[in-house]
Image (cartoon, rainbow, N blue to C red):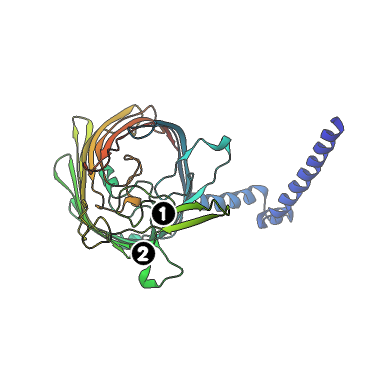
Amino acid sequence: MGKQWLGFLMALGIIGAQATVAVAEDRTSLEELLFDKGVITKDEAALVQGRKLSKWIDRVTFAGDIRLRHESFYRNTTDDRHRQRFRLRIGPELKIGDLTVGIRLASGTGEQVSTNKSFDNLSSQTALYIDRAFLKWHSPELRWLTLTGGRMQNPFFTVYSSDAVWDDDFNPEGFAENFAFKLGGTELFLNIAQIVLDEDSSGRPSTDQWLFGQQVGVKATPIHNVQTTLAAAYYNAVNVQNNNLGQSVCQSGNSRSQSACPTSTTQTANLTTGNVTTTTTQTTLVNDYNVLDVTAMVATKLWSLPVSVMGDFLQNTADTKASSSATAADTKDSGYQAGLILGKASDPQTWELAYFYKLVGTDATLADLADSDFGEGGTDRKGHIVWAAYNPSKALQVKVKYFKTEREDDLATPNDINRLQADLSVKF
C-alpha cells in the first residue's frame, strides 16, 4: 500500500513539474523576452505588465451574494413542510468604452422565478445556470438613453409591491430601451421592452409568444426630504394561447386548458397485456393578458428613520374567461399590493420592519412571472406579508419573513398556506 502511495505521489510530482514548465513557457511575454535580451531592465518590465493588468482591472466590477434559508409551510390541505435552501449568485461586469458586458451565474434548478436550491439528494452536486448575459450601451454624450439586449435585469421601474407582476428573480430575455430626462428637480422616464416568452420551432414567427411592455413615469421631490415616484405600465402578451410557454415551473392561478402545467402526463395500464400507455397533454393559457400596472412610492424620513410607502394596482384589460367556452364565467382579473417599510437594513447596525397586503385575481397577470413566494407562487391568492431584517455589518443581513395567505376565490376549495422564511445573507 505504501508503494502505491509513493508511486502516486511521484507521478503527481512529475505531472506538476511538467505543468509548471508548460505554464511558464506559455506565459513568456514580450517584456520578459526584452529583459532576457538586456533591452530593458527588470523594473521597466514589471512596470509595463502592471499597467496592462491595471487597465483590465479598472474595467471589471465583480459582485455576488450567498443566502442560507430555512423555510416552513403550514397548510390546511396537506402536511406541513420544512426545508433548508441556499442561493449563490456571482458575476462580473466588463466596461469597454460605452459598452457593458454583463454576466451572472446562479444556483437553482433552472426555474424562471427562483435561484434557490434545496438541501436534498444526499448532497449531490448542483449546477450553476446562466442567470444574466447581456450587452448594455450607454454613452455620456446621450445620457438620456440606455440600450440593452440579452438575458438582463428587469428593465422596468419596480418596487417591492411590484412582485404582484414580476418576481424579483425573473431576468427577461429580449431587448430594452430606457429613456430618462431631467427637468430641474424632476425626472421623466420611459421604459420599453420586447421580451421573448417562447419561440416555437415548429410554428411561424407570427405565432411566437412575446411580451411587449411600455412604462412611463415621473420622479419628483415636491417638498423637502420627500421623494415620490409614479409610473404606469402596459404589458401586452402576444400569442400566449398558441402553445405552451416551455417554462421550467408552472405557478398556480391562471385559467389553463388543463389543470396541470407545463404538461399533464397520465399512464394507463392494460391489465390483460401488461402494457402501459403514457399520454402527455400540453397545457396552454385560456386568456389573453393585456395588463395595466400602476406603481407609486413615497419615500421620506421621520427624524433620521427612512420610511417608504408603496403600492401597485393591476388590471388585465383583456376579456377573461374561466375556460375556452364562450359561455364560461368571467374570472377575476385585477389585483393590488400596498404597504410600508420602516427603516432600511443596509448599513452596519441598521434594521427595517415591513407590512404589506396583497390580493391578485386568477387572471390579473401572468402567474408564471409573478412572485414565487406568495402562497405557492402565482395568482388567485390574497393575504398578509410581514418581515424584520437587521444588518450587523454592511455585508451581512439576518431576515425573518412571514406570509399568511388564502385562495382569492372564496367559493373555491379552501387552500390556506402560511409560509415562514428565515434568511442569513452575505453580499460581496
Q: Residues within 10 Å of mark 2 (few under 14, many from 20)?
A: many
- 81, above or below 359, in the image: above
Q: Is residue 301 above or below residue 294?
A: above
Q: Position of residue 373 (x, y in %)?
A: 35, 40
- Return the mark for residue 409: none
Quarter of the view holding residue 258: bottom left
The answer for how far apart the CA atoms under marks 2 and 1 are is 15 Å
Quarter occupied by the C terminus: top left
Amino acid under label 2?
Answer: Gln
User: Mark 1 belongs to which amino acid?
Assistant: Pro
Residue lying farthest to the left in this orientation: 223
Tell me what residue is drawn at x 67 percent, y 55 percent: 29
Determine the residue positioned at 52% across, 36% down.
120
Q: Nearer the viewer, residue 68 or 358?
A: 358
Q: Quadrant of the N terminus?
A: top right
Q: Are marks 2 and 1 in contact (CB under 8 Å)?
A: no
What residue sits right under mark 2 in the picture? 209
From the image, tell me which residue sits under label 1.
Answer: 262
Q: In the visual, does 89 lie left or right of 38?
A: left
**Residue 212 placement (x, y as % from top left):** 30, 63
Q: Residue at x 28, y 42 (%)?
A: 160
Rendered position, 343 above or below 143: above
